[in-house]
């Protein structure tokens, strides 16, 4: 043994539930409705553009802030979608994925002891990112079953130490979305304070039922204090590409880049080159909501033959379900049992909470081929009965 003493920065963090469940899926040959990734092929035109970028020789470091033609295409898209003019040079940074954008944003602004308001259930990187910066997560539960934010609770949670509020719309794991009124209330609450907003909008193109995505970018006053984080993996069904970006006002971007340049420094060049031209094709991302809504509806229809009670999903890849007619066991136990015995992987929503209070909600990912959804529901019916 070396005479080194080691104190973990994240003593309570284990392997993420997605890694655990995906490993179990392989071990038990289970259908994976757990981790959020599509099992259908990505856009082949974009795949060819990426391959071409490699053979054309775009294989060296991209500039730290990202391939300029891609940043310009993003600025054009933001203007087209949200009527906001952002400067590709000083307000957009390309990074290896949305998770990296969120980490760099939080690390850029947090000092030890700062408080950060997060809503639970929460995407699993937020709280560890806060903790590694020795800041304090202030957790506010979303209401069940509609998973809305109670803005009065937020108001009461704000103190002099509040440095940031993290929002996520459309929301993982619940599929809820924020409304214009939510954004207005947030804007009113932070006005005149030193509070930053980190807005996770990786599912911006997956909003259902004709609703519009309420991006922070629609609200210039809010944007002035925000880091808005995106992921191309979710836009083009290529989560393995790990390419995303952060849009923030120039002053905040300067601090963001100070962290990022000593972290990853730059992101994979060929995919940046490919997306730079492909992003100009608005139709591809504008069709996504309709396509994914069809998946959601197909899954909901199949699940009518089971005793699960699906909650409403307005966006993202996900829908949650309760199961009071099936069992009263905690969701972690049921998820494990379904993986091992029914051959279907789901994610227990309790994994998105830090405390150990038992929950009884499972998350299903419907960004899968129809055959995959059919096979999963068939197995559930065979195992659980009607
Ligand atoms: C809410 C949310 N934010 C961020 C990410 C991460 O995106 P990326 O894979 O680009 O890091 C995910 C991925 O599942 C997510 O669900």
Image: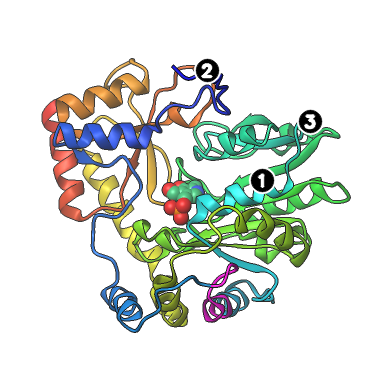
Secondary structure of the residue carrying tag 2 is loop
Work out whether residue 277 can be spotted. yes
Instruction: Indicate if the residue with disc 2 has its beta carbon within 8 Å of ligand 1.
Output: no
Q: Residues within 10 Å of mark 3 (few under 14, many from 20)?
A: few
Residue 113 is one of the magenta-drawn residues: no
**Quadrant housing residue 341:** top left
82 in relation to 263, above or below: below
22 in relation to 104, above or below: above
Q: In front: mark 1 or mark 3?
A: 1
Give the residue at x 81% y 50%.
188
Residue under numbered circle 2: 3
Q: Residues within 10 Å of mark 1 (few under 14, many from 20)?
A: many
Q: In front: mark 3 or mark 2?
A: 2
Residue under numbered circle 1: 107
The image shows residue 13 at horizontal and vertical percentages of 49, 27
Residue 378 left/right relative to 94: left
Q: In front: mark 1 or mark 2?
A: 2
**Quick one: which residue is furthest to the left in this view?**
382
The residue segment tinted magenta is 63-73
Counting residues from the start of the chain, the first of labels 1 and 3 encountered is: 1
Residue under numbered circle 3: 156
Give the residue at x 53% y 52%.
100
Measure the C-alpha gap from mark 1 to mark 2: 31 Å
Measure the C-alpha gap from mark 1 to mark 3: 25 Å
Counting residues from the start of the chain, the first of labels 3 and 2 encountered is: 2
Q: How is the image coloured?
A: rainbow
Measure the C-alpha gap from mark 3 to mark 2: 47 Å
Work out whether residue 314 can be spotted. no
């Amino acid at each position: 043994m070396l005479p080194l003493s080691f104190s973990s920065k994240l003593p309570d963090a284990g392997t993420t539930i997605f890694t655990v469940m995906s490993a179990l899926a392989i071990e038990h040959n289970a259908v994976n409705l757990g981790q959020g990734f599509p099992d259908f092929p990505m856009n082949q035109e974009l795949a060819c553009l990426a391959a071409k970028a490699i053979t054309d020789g775009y294989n060296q470091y991209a500039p730290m802030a990202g391939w300029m033609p891609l940043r310009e295409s993003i600025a054009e898209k933001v203007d087209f979608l949200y009527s906001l003019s952002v400067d590709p040079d000083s307000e957009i940074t390309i990074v290896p994925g949305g998770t990296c954008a969120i980490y760099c944003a939080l690390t850029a602004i947090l000092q030890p002891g700062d408080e950060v308001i997060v809503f639970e259930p929460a995407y699993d990187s937020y709280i560890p990112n806060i903790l590694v910066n020795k800041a304090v997560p202030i957790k506010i539960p979303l209401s069940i079953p509609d998973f809305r934010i109670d803005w009065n609770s937020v108001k009461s949670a704000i103190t002099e130490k509040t440095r940031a509020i993290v929002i996520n719309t459309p929301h993982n794991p619940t599929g809820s979305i924020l409304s214009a009124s939510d954004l207005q209330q947030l804007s009113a609450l932070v006005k005149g304070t030193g509070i930053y907003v980190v807005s996770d909008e990786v599912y911006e193109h997956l909003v259902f039922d004709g609703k519009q995505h309420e991006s922070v970018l629609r609200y210039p006053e809010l944007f002035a204090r925000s880091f808005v984080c995106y992921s191309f993996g979710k836009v083009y069904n290529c989560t393995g590409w790990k390419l995303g970006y952060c849009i923030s006002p120039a002053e905040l971007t300067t601090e963001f880049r100070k962290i990022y340049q000593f972290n990853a420094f730059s992101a994979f060049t060929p995919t940046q080159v490919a997306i730079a031209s492909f992003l100009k094709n608005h139709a591809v991302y504008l069709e996504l909501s309709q396509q994914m809504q069809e998946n959601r509806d197909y899954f909901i229809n199949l699940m009518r033959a089971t005793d699960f009670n699906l909650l409403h999903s307005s966006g993202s890849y996900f829908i949650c379900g309760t199961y009071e007619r099936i069992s009263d066991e905690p969701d972690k136990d049921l998820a494990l049992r379904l993986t091992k015995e029914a051959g279907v992987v789901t994610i227990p929503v309790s994994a998105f909470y830090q405390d150990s209070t038992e929950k009884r909600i499972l998350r299903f990912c419907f960004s899968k081929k129809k055959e995959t959804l059919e096979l999963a529901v068939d197995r559930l019916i065979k195992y659980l009965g009607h």
